[in-house]
Amino acid sequence: MSKFLFTDNDWTFPRLDAVTEAIAVIAAEELHLDTYPNQLEVISAEQMLDAYASIGLPVYYAHWSFGKQRAIESGQYRRGEMGLAYELVINSDPCISYLMEENTMTMQTLVIAHAAFGHNAFFKNNAFFRQWTDAEGIIDYLAFAQRYIAQCEERFGMDAVTDVLDAAHAISRNGIDRARRPRQLSAREEEQRWQERERYLEQQVLEIWRTLPPAHTPSTHSPDIFPSEPQENLLYFIEKNAPHLEGWKREILRIVRKITQYLYPQGQTKIMNEGFACFVHYHIMHSLHAKGLLTDGTLLEFYASHTAVVMQPDFDDRRYSGLNPYALGFAIFQDIKRICVAPTEEDRRWFSFAGDPDWLQHIHFAMREFRDESFVLQYLSPKVMRDLHLFSLHNAVDEATYRVSAIHDDAGYQHLREALAQQIADSSRPPDIQVISVDRWGDRQLRLKQMDQQALDLEEAQKTLGYIQELWGYDVHLDIEDQTLTVPQPRPDDEP
Amino acid sequence: MSTIIDRRSSGTRSTSNQERLQRRVRARLKSAVEKMARSGSIEDLANADQPISIPTRDLHEPNFRRDFSDSSWERVLPGNKEYQRGDEINKPEGGGAGQGREGSPDGLGDDEVAIVLSADEFLDLLFDGLALPNLRKTAQGDVQAEQWRRAGFIKDGSPSRMHVGRTMRAARARRLALRAGKRRELQELEEARSKLQEEISTRIARKEDVSLEQERLKILDEQISILARKIKAIPFIDEADLRFAHIDQQPHPITNAVMFCVMDVSGSMGEKEKDLAKRFFLLLYLFLHRHYQAVQIVFIKHHSTATECTEQAFFGAREGGGTLVSPAIMLTEDIMTKRFPPDRWNVYVAQVSDGDNYFADNTVVAEHLHQLLPRLRNLFYLEVNRENESDLLQLYDGIAEDYPELITARASAQEDIYPLFRTLFSSEEIPSHV
């Protein structure tokens, strides 16, 4: 009697159960993974497209942009330009993983190892997720958001709600406190109460503003600067300080802000998250095979999928579309293990932990304490750079050619590492635009300033400014290095 | 520790987003639909599940983002083969920051979103704001048919409608009710009788007098036999038990419509005229279909004589000869009376002609129209491809002054049909002539 969990490739619910159990043993005993309880849900391709359209969230409020996303993706899917992911996993407690019904049993095994244990452990342990997201409450909050927005549509009309959501989405990427971490989860309810109080105070302020005679005091004499420090969280600032915004609109801004914040760590840890999940499934699949639970055929099928997932096309390949986070993340995590188990002279020069036989501890440390930018800066080794044949290209606007600034050699390793970390940081961070002043005693105009030096897409910025102005209710200006952007024509006022 | 749930049966949840998306681009969808109605092929129009592509700029979602085209950057790339530090590489033509994707087989580029409308959504957009001019009649309820409907059970009716089950149920209930009391009484009497008999036998044993008891026994026996007869006399089935299924006449509005397509197929009607006619008929058909459960179509072609024919023959045939309109009107009237009596059908007539008619025939036409029109919902007369109004059109216009059911129009190009259709049916006012 063989011990194989399955020999043919059709999945059944009992098999899923047995496989999950076997994986759980390996995850706990060999990898010491600490995970949320798992909830595995089998879904169809149509449902997967649905999930795609709402950023993978199981419950989401309705908005036309999600319909657009779905139209684009289902078109690509139907034309065969895009395959669907085998799985989708949600950072919640219990951790929800979606398994596609089309998957073979081998794929389901891989997916359970990857998502239900790899991603799950990452969600539960990575410092970023721990500090920024509330896995326990998210599903309830999403359901609340969906209900609330549906109610608003009923009361105030679909168009009014859409307008607010459009505006909120436009600045959602600038709706995150990057410098200041949100409060700890234990203080969640406390925070809520505190915000209630704050909102009440804002309303009081509003009343006082109303009684002031308009524009009697010239703005140049304004004695105070408000806000006292520049504010990076535009959504939060508008939610709390917009002079005439109705309560329900503020609540919608808050919902968009909360959900954006919940999703924020995912954008910051894409390489690590996927890399770690790949590392976990790779270990688990081999371990299952070593224990005699998987057939050789299953292992071969696994290799085929695995290599397809972690493949990095060269820059001049037709399939190239940027660095593959699966490939890079997996390579680095595998490399951490190699540096511990079989270090070279070079590794010893680069990494203080080289040769420490307790590789699992270092894997866990890397998984817990970093995000993509710092992870690359800390762990991208010369070996991985050589394997991927990395090189960096510099573009100067006024030159006719690109210049190769570094390649994978001794002179280039350090530069490559830093350039890549910078590149990751830039791509995962929106332009730094902050509120610098509100003319509280004059025309109430809102002044924004771009704080970084990156070139801004001006046309886009102007349109976005239009949305901000819609929410703010008064003129909005954006200072960029040498010019000031304004909204060209004042949009027709929302008020009746 | 882990739960497995089968979620496949819960279906998709994208409808509400889809709805909002369509709402957002409604104006654009509408103009695309209208363009199809004006110049697209008739097949497209008839089975409208073609995706409509909407440029993404209509659905643009702006935010603050970087502009890489006009700034310096440094980028790390994989797969170096021969480059050394300091190598210079020519920039590709046209900036090259973005990688364009080639158009896909269905002609959609990156900057377009395909929206697939269901047939209903398509027609909603196509006929947005349009209404049938004569529909008010139905609202007032003047055209209603009677229909037999089941209406419970009654105690009286013809034997053929007797409901056996119900009848037997009633009979059994009656029997039970009538018997129960008597049975109880009978039982008591029998108990009393057996007691008496016992007493008699003990008295006999003690050699006592039993004449009184014998007397009582006789009375009891008589009472018992009377009761037994009474119980037996309860009929198995009684007239009161009979139940009959009842049917009743109930009024209900007529939801079927018939559309007569009448077309001149004489030599003067060419391919182009027929295409105009076809487009007009199709739009009218789709429009009627939105109002009625089922729409029947009768094709009548005519030159100097009129015949009913199939759709293929209708649009395909080209026959010579002169033109007489009155036979077509008469045939329509005839078929309507025989097969589609107006008290049971909503009758619409759509007539397309180039206006040629023998002058002498016009009076005959007028005469028959006067008979026909009051029995119709509408008669649409479309005159195609003529520079000036024909005598026939003038005749129709004259009649239309008395009969609002008659609606006339002229068109000379394919693109005219849909706008014409919109003016004919725009719900603000009901024009009798355009």
Image (tube, rainbow, N blue to C red):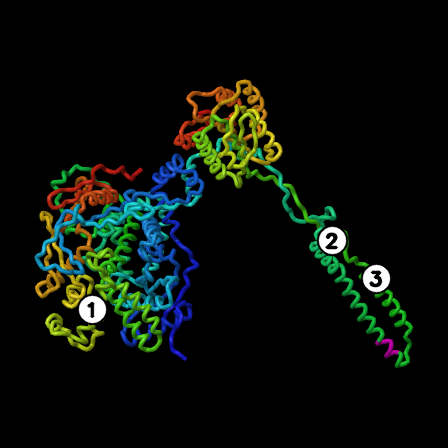
Name the mark nearer the viewer: 2 or 3.
Answer: 2
Q: Quadrant of the C terminus of chain A?
A: top left
Is the residue A23 above or below the residue B308 in the image?
below
Magenta region's main secondary structure?
helix
Chain bearing tag 1 is A
- B161 or B313, nearer to the observer: B313
Amino acid on which disc 2 is placed: Asp
The circle drawn on residue B241 is: 2
Marks 2 and 3 close (CB-CB < 8 Å):
no
Q: Position of residue B67 (x, y in %)?
A: 17, 48
Marks 3 and 1 close (CB-CB < 8 Å):
no
The circle drawn on residue A104 is: none
Q: Point out the tag, 2 or 3, that comes first from the N-terminus.
A: 3
Q: Which residues are magenta?
A: B198-203
Q: Which residue is mark 3?
A: B229
Q: Position of residue A52 (x, y in %)?
A: 33, 55
Amino acid on which disc 1 is placed: Ala
Mark 2 → mark 3, Cα distance in angstroms: 22 Å
